[in-house]
Amino acid sequence: MKILRILNRSIRDSFKSIFRNFSLSFASVSCTVITLILVAISIIASYNVTEITDKIERDLTVIVFIDNKTDQTGIDKIKNQIKNISNIDTKSIVFRSKEEIKETMGNENAELKSIMDTWEKDENPLQSTYILKVKDIKKIKETATSLKNIENVTLVKYGETMVERMVNVFDIVKKICIILVVALILVTAFLITNTIKITIFSRRNEINIMRLVGTSNTVIRLPFIFEGFLLGLIGSIIPILITIFGYTYLYDAMGGVVLSNLVELVTPSSIVYIASLIVLIVGSIVGMLGSALAVRKYLKV
């Protein structure tokens, strides 16, 4: 019961302190709102970039062209050598003969079909191919080089220029988002810590009286810790609303894609609630930690 009374009094005192120092609390909450909005934006951007990169990796296919002079034994040998490359997803390897490619192209284009129908079997200039996927898209350049070095492989295509540029750009954006999230969390902690410091200074006489009458360190600290928690919690409400409704509106307005269908946004249901929960946790916990740090460093008890 004593613990409950202490907690109840601490929570009550924290609310009183927030209203008593309303201007400081409002400034702290306002700054926290701004930083947490940026944290939410960074989280959503990072999540989207990760999903886009993963989608490119899942959908990217490498086409290995085989010399037309290669017999079936040579084709099988090429497949075995492809399997020996560590970055190749061996389950994804599919062989397409030049006859299959001819038929597919003919079905897709009537004009091409009329031309290809005039070819005799030994006149087909198309090349048989192996179509495959890689495990790690970041190593695709080295993997393509290994594939090119296989005997009777004439060409390896995977849209190298575009893919490499996109992967590099997304990788940089992802790292920037992570750094930004960490930096903004530290800024939030700094703002709340400074608010609690000023609150402690304004209540120094009250604190000294509490110390003189033998109040424990824990009882003195708790109201400040709860105050930091509440400031962080209040400061996370607006960012959460902006995250949920803002991203949903953006997704609908853009049709779920950026520039082209190649870059698709993550559906709101998959991310907004996760981002909101992270913002709520960051705001409340950082508020508590900021308060605890301010109390430990500046409250000599």
Image: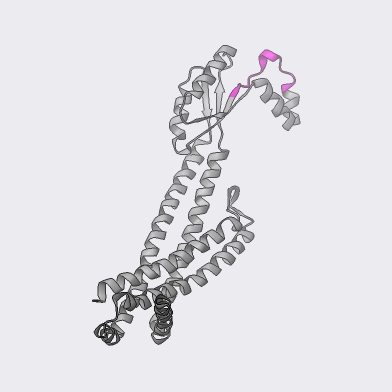
Does 53 appear above or below 30? above
Task: Provide the major secondary structure of the magenta segment.
Answer: loop
Q: Residue 176: image x %, image y %? A: 41, 54
Does 294 appear above or below 80? below
Q: Residue 217: image x %, image y %? A: 29, 76
Q: Residue at x 53, y 16 (%)?
A: 77
How many numbered discs? 0
Q: Residue at x 58, y 39 (%)?
A: 59
Q: Residue extending furthest front?
A: 1
Magenta-colored stretch includes residue 203: no
Does 66 appear above or below 234? above
**Viewport quadrant of the C terminus:** bottom left
Q: Residue 155: image x %, image y %? A: 52, 25
Say whether residue 228 is left or right of residue 44.
Answer: left
Say whether residue 269 is left or right of residue 46.
Answer: right
Q: Residue at x 66, y 18 (%)?
A: 124
**Viewport quadrant of the N terminus:** bottom left
Q: Which residues are magenta?
A: 116-129
